[in-house]
Amino acid sequence: MIKGRRIRAIAGACALAVALPLSAWGAAEDAIGNWRDADSGGIVSVYSCGGGICVKVVKPGKGREKDDANPNPQLKGRSMAGVVLMNGATKAGADKWKGKLYNSEDGETYTGYLTSSGKDELKLEGCVLGGMICKSRTWKRVQ
């Protein structure tokens, strides 16, 4: 009797250990694809990278074609197409990822969050001062 309970407990723990990573990956998989910025019309790609997710510019938005604020003289003025905006984002909650976020408006890197609001909407948010001041962008899935 005790042996049977122990086997069921071990089997249950194994099933849970397998199910949790798969469910976390499923949520990240939902974010994978191309997204259009609601304000600028630019398009970004969310893709798997190094066990997390990354975001890069596919088509710069209107008025955001060049990386003019980059403090690195070798990168300043480059085309925004292909620039990685977020890299190494890891799971930070239900449908939420946390990573380093490059802000092309000031050339700085911040802690950023990517949050899924369903299969067709993502919100990118960057914060400073421990989250006291935040800016966000909303993206819609490109069909």
Image: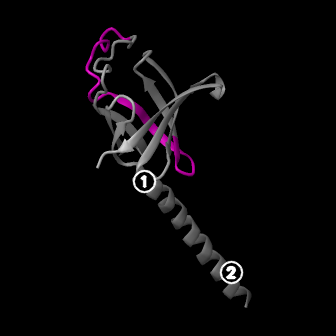
Percent coordinates x, y for residue 7 in the rendering: 63, 82
Mark 2 and mark 1 in contact? Answer it, CB < 8 Å: no
| Above or below 105: residue 139 | below
Query: Which numbered mark, 2 or 1, is in the foreground of this view?
Result: 1
Name the side, left or right, on which 58 lies relative to 123: left
Spot the residue most to the right: 2
Secondary structure beneath dot 1 equals loop
- Start-end of magenta stretch: 72-97
Name the side, left or right, on which 44 lies relative to 105: left
User: How many numbered discs?
Assistant: 2
Percent coordinates x, y for residue 131 in the rendering: 63, 28
Question: Could you tell me which residue is drawn at 32 percent across and 32 percent down?
Answer: 41
Residue 88 among those drawn in magenta:
yes
Question: Could you tell me which residue is drawn at 29 percent across and 11 percent down?
Answer: 74
Name the side, left or right, on which 5 lies relative to 48: right
Kindly identify the amino acid type of the residue bearing the numbered disc 1.
Lys
On-image quarter of the N terminus: bottom right
Q: Which mark is residue 6?
A: 2
The quadrant where residue 127 appears: top right
Name the side, left or right, on which 27 lies relative to 82: right
Question: Could you tell me which residue is drawn at 40 percent across and 10 percent down?
Answer: 71
Residue underneath mark 1 = 119
Spot the residue most to the front: 39
Percent coordinates x, y for residue 139 in the rendering: 41, 39
Secondary structure beneath dot 2 equals helix
Percent coordinates x, y for residue 99 in the rendering: 50, 35
| Above or below 12: residue 85 | above
Kindly identify the amino acid type of the residue bearing the numbered disc 2.
Arg
| Above or below 60: residue 28 | below
